[in-house]
């Protein structure tokens, strides 16, 4: 594996870490971010859990927002300041586009789009 | 010493106050308690709530039920109120003339004019044509961009695009020469094809300039003065948008229809007057003042107001188990409001703010079966139950236990269904009124003006201050201060306005800004409570002169609100009135006034009895 450049050397961007190069999910994620106008950087990653990849990606992003895509195409969205075990959102490849939008919205501070299969469960905390 | 409990059965809460009364009438208050009223006030259903509150208040005072000498219950005021709301305007788009919504991310910028053509038919357009491309559902953004680029390469001038998916920026980024693109048009299939059209997208942070201007549209479509007059409502409907589409169809139009709201007839003791609902709340309330005291109100059958009053009557007759034509409306409060409503004929789920009138009506019913209720209570509690005391008199007695008050004193009981007022002069005479409109109407106004369709959320917005979740770890309050959290906030709350409810942060799932929601909340409270406070005080004040009232004590659930008491105090500040939230017995706040008054009245009667006897 090549030496990973430090986050400081990149322009500010959301980082996507994907175990399978050219996965369909990545196209959707890129499209979501582009539509919202936020830069994205995609990096290859060794096989791991989507949430673990997403948290590491968020740590590597100077914007503090990362997305992980695992072997099965599951997409996970994470924020650098959240606890590792508590990602923002995750879902199947079908919601990759929406998660791309939401990654961008985390950066610019807009309310998130609801996932298609997420019926807006009653709010509890 | 005699142990007595005063119990006040209200519309929503049942309150109790327990005290030891000495033979000379000296009163030692021990505790107060409150529970939800069971059933409709004044009916036998209330027994469960009364039993519960009696047990609770005895528990708090650590006294044995066996010691209890009597339970005092007030003569319940038989008033209930009802609410109705109707929109009186409607916006209709005919022949799909325009799309005027605000997608989050339209693409490109500028103004494009051309003939609408389906994306699939772009290949058949002859070079030299000037077109606007309509991209339906299921077309990938790369294919759309490639198609438009190919058409442009053949000499077809594509000046703008209308897109179904949220793809505008993606397509615009892939075009060789950028064009304005409006996206998220849900009913894109209904856009008329082969018609002259214009697409406008403003730069970020700006609003459209040409399609929101009647002469701008006239210039584009070469309209004569008569046609310009026809198109003017379209321009008006698009003001404030960042993007818009106008299609020139042969008879397309945006109609701003006024729904015939009907005539409200107010029947007073001495006079009878009619007023058009269209005239607005101010005119309705002015007419009401001319006919007061109100005996009944009627709405023109077959119109909105007729329907509204029928709704109120039906609900009331059902609640009180009496005949519909026996229900008399004794007060109304009309409030001007607006409701965001889906525009008829819109292609992208556009909303328009429609005018509406909300009407609260107060109904006087036949006296409830108080003696029957008292008998049931005697059986349930196995103790003497005394019914006595007019509610208003008792409330005044209770309110006067607030430190710093004296006669002449007016009380304002700000409840859920009605706003009640009573005035006790120095001579002890009590006058009282019951007015329509209170907390429930405020909730309804907030719910409809914000388009929430969620009563519970509207209730939280009414009761609690707002904040905005600015990150996963901090919120900004409406006063500008920030508050930090150790645990990350829920995803649904991110970047949203939240109500700081008792149960935690409650996100408001709308696009309204914090300032807008705050403004709606405050104006709803003003339109109901400040208006009603002034109306009520005017009716009980000697000669209608508010300056004759020395003290105003605010009571009831809504007097606990974090801003309503301040609003009322501000409104009467110029009149030399001392106004504030009550603090019954120096400890109960604005609660427990009637229950306390029952005990005080009982004690006074007892001391009088002793005096006469000796």
Image: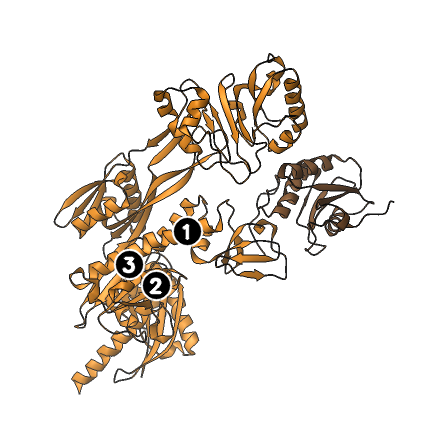
Q: Chain of mark 3?
A: B
Give the number of the disc on residue B533: 3
Quadrant location, the N terminus of chain B: bottom left
The answer to whether dots 1 and 2 both sit on one chain is yes
In the image, residue B602 sits, relative to residue B531, either above or below, namely below
Task: Evaluate whether residue B390 shows in this view.
Answer: no
x 42%, y 30%: residue: B213
Q: Position of residue B77 (x, y in %)?
A: 26, 60
Q: In which quarter of the view is residue A46 placed?
A: top right
Task: Evaluate whether residue B156 shows in this view.
Answer: yes
Mark toward the start of the polypeptide (1 vs 2): 1
Q: Is residue B474 left or right of residue B555?
A: right
Q: Are marks 3 and 2 in contact (CB under 8 Å)?
A: no
Q: Is residue B242 left or right of residue B299?
A: right
Q: Position of residue B258 (x, y in %)?
A: 32, 33
Between the C-alphas of marks 3 and 2, the distance is 13 Å
| Chain orange in the figure, letter | B
What residue is disc 2 on?
B556
Give the number of the disc on residue B519: 1
């Amino acid at each position: 594996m090549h030496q990973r450049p430090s986050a400081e050397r990149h322009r500010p961007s959301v980082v996507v870490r994907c175990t399978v190069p050219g996965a369909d999910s990545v196209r959707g994620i890129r499209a979501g971010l582009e539509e919202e106008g936020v830069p994205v950087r995609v990096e290859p990653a060794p096989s791991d859990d989507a949430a673990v990849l997403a948290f590491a990606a968020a740590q590597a992003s100077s914007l503090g927002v990362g997305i992980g895509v695992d072997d099965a195409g599951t997409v996970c969205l994470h924020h650098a300041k959240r606890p590792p075990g508590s990602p923002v959102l995750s879902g199947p490849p079908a919601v990759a586009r929406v998660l791309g939008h939401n990654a961008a919205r985390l950066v610019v501070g807009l309310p998130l789009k609801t996932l298609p299969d997420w019926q807006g469960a009653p709010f509890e905390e | 010493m005699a142990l007595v409990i005063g119990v006040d059965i209200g519309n929503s809460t049942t309150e109790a106050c327990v005290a030891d009364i000495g033979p000379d009438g000296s009163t030692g208050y021990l505790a107060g308690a409150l529970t939800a009223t069971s059933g409709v006030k004044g009916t036998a259903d209330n027994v469960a709530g009364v039993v519960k509150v009696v047990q609770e208040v005895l528990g708090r005072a650590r006294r044995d039920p066996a010691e209890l000498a009597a339970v005092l219950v007030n003569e319940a005021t038989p008033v209930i109120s009802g609410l109705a709301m109707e929109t009186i305007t409607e916006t209709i788009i005919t022949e799909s003339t325009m799309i005027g919504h605000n997608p989050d991310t339209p693409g490109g910028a500028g103004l494009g004019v051309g003939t609408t053509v389906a994306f699939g038919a772009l290949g058949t357009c002859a070079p030299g044509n000037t077109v606007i491309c309509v991209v339906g559902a299921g077309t990938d953004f790369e294919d759309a961009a490639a198609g438009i680029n190919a058409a442009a390469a053949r000499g077809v001038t594509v000046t703008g695009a209308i897109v179904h998916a949220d793809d505008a920026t993606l397509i615009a980024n892939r075009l060789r020469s950028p064009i304005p693109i409006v996206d998220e048009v849900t009913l894109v299939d209904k856009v008329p094809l082969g018609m002259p059209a214009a697409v406008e997208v403003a730069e970020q942070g700006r609003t459209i300039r040409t399609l929101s201007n009647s002469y701008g549209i006239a210039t584009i479509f070469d309209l004569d003065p008569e046609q310009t007059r026809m198109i003017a409502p379209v321009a008006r409907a698009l003001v404030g948008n960042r993007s818009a589409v106008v299609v020139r169809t042969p008879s397309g139009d945006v109609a701003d229809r006024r729904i015939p709201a009907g005539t409200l007839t107010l029947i007073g003791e001495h006079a009878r007057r009619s007023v058009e609902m269209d005239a607005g709340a101010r005119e309705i309330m002015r007419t009401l003042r001319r006919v007061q005291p109100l005996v009944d109100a009627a709405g023109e059958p077959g119109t909105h107001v007729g329907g509204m009053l029928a709704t109120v009557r039906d609900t009331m007759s059902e609640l009180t188990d009496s005949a519909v034509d026996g229900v008399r409306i004794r007060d109304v409060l009309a409030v001007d409001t607006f409701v965001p409503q889906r525009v008829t004929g819109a292609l992208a789920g556009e909303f328009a703010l429609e005018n509406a009138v909300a009407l609260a009506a107060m109904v006087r019913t036949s006296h409830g079966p108080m003696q029957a209720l008292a008998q049931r209570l005697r059986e349930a509690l196995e103790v003497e139950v005394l019914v006595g005391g007019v509610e208003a008199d008792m409330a005044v007695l209770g309110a006067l236990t607030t430190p710093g008050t004296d006669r002449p004193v007016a009380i304002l009981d700000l409840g859920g269904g009605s706003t009640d007022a009573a005035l006790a002069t120095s001579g002890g005479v009590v006058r009282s009124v019951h007015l329509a409109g209170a907390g429930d109407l405020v909730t309804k106004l907030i719910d409809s003006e914000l388009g929430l369709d969620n009563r519970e959320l509207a209730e939280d917005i009414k009761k609690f201050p707002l904040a905005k979740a600015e990150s996963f770890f901090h919120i900004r309050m409406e006063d500008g201060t920030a508050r930090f959290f150790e645990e990350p906030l829920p995803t649904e709350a991110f970047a949203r306005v939240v109500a700081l409810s008792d149960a935690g942060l409650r996100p408001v799932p709308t696009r309204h800004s914090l300032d807008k929601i705050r403004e709606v909340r405050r104006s709803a409270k003003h339109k109901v409570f400040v208006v009603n406070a002034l109306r009520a005080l005017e009716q009980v004040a000697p000669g209608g002169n508010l300056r004759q009232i020395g003290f105003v004590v605010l009571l009831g659930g809504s007097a606990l609100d974090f801003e309503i008491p301040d609003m009322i105090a501000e409104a009467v500040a110029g009149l030399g009135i001392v106004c504030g939230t009550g603090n019954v017995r120096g400890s109960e706040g604005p609660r427990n006034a009637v229950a306390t008054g029952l005990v005080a009245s009982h004690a006074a009667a007892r001391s009088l009895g002793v005096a006469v006897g000796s």
